[in-house]
C-alpha cells in the first residue's frame, strides 16, 4: 500500500512537473497595430464633401498571436479594415482571421500547414510575403515541407492557393493553384574541409507551376504554366559574385496583353568589400516576367514571383514622390554603389571620420522587334507570340535614372550632419500610367542636421528643395491638369524635438510653390507627437497629406491627398 | 519497482531542467553574410548579454543608430562583453548590397540577412529599427523601437543592469 502511495505521489508529481514544464516551455507572443484617420474636407487641396462621400473615418488594424512549444508553433492574424484607410484597396473592407498556421520543425524536417510565407532564391519565380503598410499579402494557403538532410543542404516544397483580399479559398476558377520546389546547396557548409576556405560557393534551383482552368472566351489558355530558375553565389575573399536566371513558359495575361511569348529574368551582381570601402554593381533584365495565379489579375494582385527593383530607395519626402517600381513586361536595369569612410584623424576625416556614398541607378526599356504573323509584321498583338527581344539589347527609352551623392559627418560631439544631392529622371507616363505626361527631370538637395542638447534631448532639422524641369510658366493644356498635381519646384522643412528614447514632437511643411497650375501651389503641413515605450509606439499626426506613392520594399501604393488627424498605435509582447 | 521510481524521479528532474533552458530565440533559419544558414535559436555570446537589432538600408534612423552604436561598440565590448547581431530586413533587391554597405560604413557587428522577414515576423517586428537585448541565457530583457539621438545610452544602461 505504501508502495502504491509512493508511486502515486511520484506519478502525480511527474505529471505535475511535466504540466509545469509544459507551461514553462510554452510561449505566447504577439503584436497589435491600429492605424486610424479622421478625414476633413479641405477645399484648399481639392478635398470636398463629395470626395469623402460620408467616409469620415478609416481604420486598419491587426492583431497577431503566436504560440510556441519546443519545435511546434502555431499562430494566427486577425485583420480589420472598417473602412480601409484612403489609398488602400476597397476590396480589403471587412474583418476576420486572414491568416493562420501550424508548424513543426526539428531542424531536419519541417512541415507547415495553413498560410505560408516563403521565398525561393531572390524570388524571381516564387515569393509570398506580407507588407501591412501597403495592404499587400500574397500568402499561400496550403502546405510546406522542408528537409535538411545534411548541413548546408535545404530542400523545400510548397503548394496552395494565394490570398486574394477576402475571397474564399473554396474550389472556384477565380485563381489557380500554385506548387513549387526549391533546392539550395551551400558547398562550404556541407563539405567539412571547406568550412574555412576563402573560396565559397553555393548553388540553388527552383521549379514552380500554377494550374488555372481555361475558361477564356477568346483564347486557348495554357492551364499549367511552369517557371524555373537557377542560381549561383561565389565569393573569394573580398570579392563576391551572384547570379540568378529565371524562365517562364507561355502565359498570356492581362498584364502582358495576352501574348504567348515565354518570359525570362536575369539578376546578377559583383561586389568588393573591405573595412571602410564597399563597391557593388548590379544588373538586371526582365522580359515578360509577370507571374500571377490568375491571368486576369492586375497591378500587384496575386503575384507569385517578385521582381526586385534594384535601384536606390529614397525615403525622404521629396525624392520619395518619384519612387520606381519594376516594369514586369520588360526592363534593363543597372545599379552601381560605392560606400567609403574617410578614416578618422585625417585631414578630410576629421575627429570622427566622414562617410561618403555614391549611387547610380538606371532603368531602360528592353528592345522589342516585330514578328511576322500571317505574312504581316506584328508587334505585341494579343494572341500572338508578341515580339522577339535580343537578350542584351537596351532601348533608348529611359524609365528611370537616379544619380546621388551623400556625405554623413559627425562634426563635433553634439552636431551631426547628413547632406545629399540627387539627380532624377522619372518617366511618369510609364511608371504611373499617366499617358502623355511629360517626364520628370529633377534635382534635389537634402540636409539633415541633428544637434544634441543634452545626453537625451536632441533637435533635428531636415531641409529639402526640388528643382523640376517644368517651371511655373509651363503652359498646361485644359483637361491635362491632373498630370501636373505634383510638378514644379518644391521646398520642404521638418523640425523635430526628441527626448530619447521616449518622446518626440515634429512639425513639417512641404510647399509646391512652383507648380505650373496655380491652384496646386499648396502647403502640406503636419504636426506629429509620438510616444515610444519599449515595443509600444503611439503617434498622433494632424495635417495634410499630399498625393503620392508610398513604396516599401519594391511594392508601391498610391496615396490620395487627404487632410485630417491620424493615430497609430503599435505594440508587441 | 525501485527502478521505476528512479526513472520517474529522473524524468521529473529532466523535465524541470528542460524548463529552465528555454530561451526567447525563435527556431528560424536565416543566412549570414557568407551565405551560411544560421538557426537563430542557436545564437549566444558565451553567457554574456547580446543585442539583436533589426534594420534596413533604406531606413535612415536605423543607419543613424548603427553609426552611433559603432562609435561606442569597442568600449561596450570591453566593459560588458556584449555582442551585437544586426539583422537586415532588406529584401532581395539589396541582398548583394549589404556586405559592401556595412563594410563601407565600417560597422563592426555580426550581420544576418532576413530576406523574407521570417525572423522579423516571428519576433513581431513591424517597423525598423527594433532592438532586442538578450541576457546570457537568451531571454529578452529589454526591447525598443525607433531611434533618436542618445537612445543608445538607455540600451547601455540596460546592458549594465545584466552585467552587474
Image (cartoon, coloured by chain):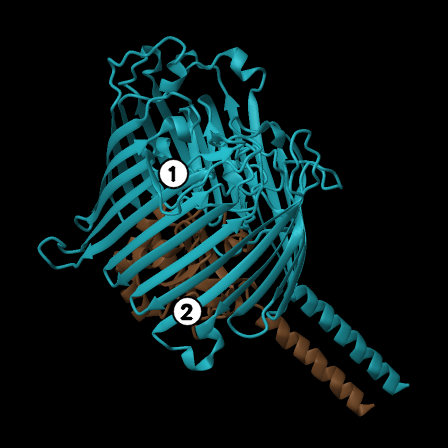
Question: Up-down: is A294 above or below A129?
Answer: above
Residue A241 location, x and y as percent?
A: 35, 61
Chain at tag 2:
A
Provide residue A421's location: percent of width, then percent of height.
Answer: 22, 38
Question: Which colour denotes chain B?
Answer: brown
Give the alpha-carbon distance from disc 2 to disc 1, as whole Å. Answer: 34 Å
Q: Residues within 10 Å of mark 2 (few under 14, many from 20)?
A: many
Left or right of A288 on screen, residue A304: right
Q: Which chain is cyan?
A: A
Vertical placement of A68 versus A562: above or below? below
Residue at position x 38%, y 66% in the image? A234
Measured from the top left, where is residue B163 in percent x and y?
A: 40, 69
Q: Mark 2 vs mark 1: tell me if same chain.
A: yes
In contact (CB < 8 Å): disc 2 and disc 1: no
* Secondary structure found at label 2: strand
| Secondary structure category for the residue under label 1 | loop
Q: Is residue A243 above or below residue A376?
A: below
Residue at the disc numbered 2: A201
In the image, is A468 to the left or to the right of A299?
left
Give the residue pinned by disc 1.
A367
Number of numbered labels in the structure image = 2
Point out residue A77 in the picture as x, y percentages from the top left corner: 63, 45
Observer-nearest residue: A5 or B52?
B52
Q: Which mark is residue A540?
A: none
- Looking at the image, residue B20 sits to the left or right of residue A195; the answer is right
- Which of the pair A430/A88 is nearer the observer? A430
Q: Is residue A125 left or right of residue A454?
A: right
Amino acid at each position: 500500500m505504501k508502495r502504491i502511495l509512493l508511486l502515486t505521489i511520484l506519478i502525480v508529481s511527474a505529471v505535475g512537473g511535466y504540466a509545469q514544464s509544459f507551461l514553462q516551455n510554452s510561449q505566447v507572443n504577439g503584436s497589435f497595430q491600429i492605424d486610424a484617420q479622421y478625414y476633413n474636407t479641405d477645399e484648399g487641396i481639392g478635398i470636398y464633401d463629395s470626395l469623402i462621400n460620408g467616409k469620415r473615418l478609416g481604420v486598419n488594424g491587426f492583431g497577431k498571436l503566436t504560440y510556441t512549444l519546443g519545435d511546434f508553433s502555431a499562430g494566427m492574424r486577425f485583420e480589420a479594415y472598417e473602412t480601409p484607410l484612403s489609398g488602400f484597396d476597397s476590396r480589403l473592407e471587412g474583418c476576420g482571421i486572414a491568416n493562420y498556421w501550424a508548424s513543426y520543425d526539428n531542424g531536419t524536417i519541417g512541415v507547415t500547414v495553413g498560410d505560408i510565407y516563403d521565398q525561393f532564391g531572390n524570388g524571381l519565380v516564387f515569393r509570398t510575403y506580407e507588407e501591412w503598410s501597403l495592404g499587400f499579402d500574397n500568402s499561400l494557403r496550403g502546405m510546406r515541407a522542408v528537409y535538411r538532410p545534411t548541413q548546408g543542404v535545404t530542400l523545400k516544397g510548397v503548394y496552395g492557393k494565394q490570398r486574394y483580399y477576402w475571397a474564399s479559398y473554396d474550389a472556384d476558377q477565380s485563381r489557380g493553384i500554385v506548387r513549387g520546389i526549391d533546392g539550395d546547396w551551400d558547398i562550404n557548409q556541407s563539405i567539412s574541409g571547406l568550412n574555412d576556405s576563402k573560396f565559397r560557393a553555393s548553388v540553388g534551383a527552383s521549379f514552380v507551376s500554377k494550374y488555372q482552368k481555361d475558361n477564356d472566351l477568346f483564347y486557348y489558355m495554357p492551364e499549367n504554366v511552369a517557371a524555373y530558375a537557377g542560381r549561383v553565389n561565389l565569393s573569394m575573399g573580398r570579392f563576391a559574385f551572384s547570379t540568378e536566371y529565371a524562365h517562364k513558359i507561355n502565359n498570356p495575361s492581362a498584364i502582358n496583353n495576352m501574348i504567348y511569348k515565354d518570359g525570362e529574368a536575369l539578376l546578377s551582381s559583383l561586389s568588393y568589400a573591405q573595412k571602410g570601402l564597399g563597391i557593388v554593381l548590379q544588373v538586371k533584365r526582365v522580359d515578360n516576367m509577370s507571374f500571377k495565379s490568375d491571368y486576369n489579375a492586375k497591378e500587384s494582385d496575386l503575384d507569385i514571383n517578385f521582381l526586385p527593383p534594384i535601384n536606390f530607395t529614397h525615403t525622404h519626402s521629396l525624392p520619395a514622390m518619384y519612387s520606381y517600381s519594376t516594369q514586369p513586361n520588360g526592363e534593363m536595369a543597372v545599379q552601381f554603389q560605392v560606400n567609403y569612410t574617410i578614416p578618422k584623424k585625417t585631414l578630410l576625416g576629421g575627429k570622427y571620420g566622414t562617410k561618403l556614398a555614391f549611387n547610380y541607378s538606371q532603368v531602360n526599356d528592353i528592345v522589342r522587334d516585330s514578328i511576322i504573323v500571317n505574312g504581316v509584321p506584328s508587334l505585341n498583338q494579343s494572341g500572338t507570340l508578341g515580339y522577339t527581344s535580343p537578350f542584351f539589347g537596351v532601348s533608348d527609352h529611359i524609365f528611370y535614372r537616379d544619380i546621388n551623392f551623400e556625405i554623413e559627418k559627425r562634426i563635433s560631439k553634439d552636431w551631426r550632419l547628413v547632406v545629399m544631392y540627387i539627380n532624377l529622371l522619372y518617366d511618369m507616363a510609364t511608371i504611373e500610367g499617366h499617358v502623355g505626361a511629360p517626364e520628370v527631370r529633377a534635382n534635389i538637395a537634402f540636409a539633415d542636421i541633428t544637434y544634441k542638447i543634452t545626453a537625451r534631448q536632441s533637435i533635428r532639422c531636415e531641409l529639402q528643395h526640388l528643382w523640376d524641369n517644368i517651371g511655373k510658366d509651363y503652359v498646361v493644356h485644359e483637361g491635362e491638369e491632373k498630370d501636373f498635381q505634383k510638378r514644379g519646384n518644391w521646398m520642404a522643412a521638418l523640425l523635430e524635438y526628441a527626448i530619447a528614447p521616449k518622446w518626440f514632437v515634429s512639425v513639417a511643411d512641404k510647399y509646391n510653390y512652383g507648380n505650373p497650375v496655380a491652384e496646386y501651389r499648396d502647403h502640406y503641413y503636419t504636426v506629429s507627437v509620438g510616444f515610444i515605450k519599449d515595443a509600444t509606439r503611439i503617434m498622433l499626426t494632424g495635417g495634410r497629406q499630399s498625393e503620392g506613392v508610398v513604396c516599401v520594399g519594391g511594392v508601391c501604393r498610391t496615396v490620395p491627398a487627404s487632410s485630417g488627424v491620424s493615430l497609430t498605435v503599435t505594440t508587441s509582447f | 519497482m525501485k527502478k521505476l521510481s528512479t526513472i520517474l524521479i529522473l524524468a521529473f528532474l529532466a523535465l524541470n531542467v528542460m524548463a529552465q533552458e528555454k530561451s526567447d530565440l525563435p527556431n528560424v533559419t536565416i543566412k549570414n553574410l557568407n551565405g551560411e544558414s544560421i538557426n537563430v535559436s542557436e545564437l549566444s555570446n558565451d553567457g554574456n548579454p547580446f543585442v539583436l537589432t533589426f534594420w534596413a538600408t533604406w531606413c535612415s534612423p536605423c543607419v543613424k543608430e548603427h553609426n552611433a552604436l559603432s562609435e561606442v561598440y569597442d568600449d561596450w565590448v570591453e566593459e560588458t562583453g556584449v555582442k551585437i547581431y544586426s539583422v537586415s530586413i532588406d529584401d532581395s533587391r539589396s541582398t548583394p548590397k549589404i556586405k559592401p554597405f556595412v563594410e563601407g560604413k565600417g560597422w563592426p557587428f555580426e550581420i544576418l540577412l532576413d530576406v523574407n522577414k521570417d525572423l522579423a515576423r516571428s519576433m513581431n517586428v513591424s517597423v525598423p529599427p527594433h532592438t532586442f537585448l538578450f541576457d546570457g541565457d537568451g531571454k529578452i530583457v529589454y526591447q525598443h523601437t525607433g531611434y533618436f539621438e542618445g537612445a543608445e545610452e538607455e540600451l547601455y544602461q540596460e546592458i549594465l543592469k545584466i552585467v552587474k
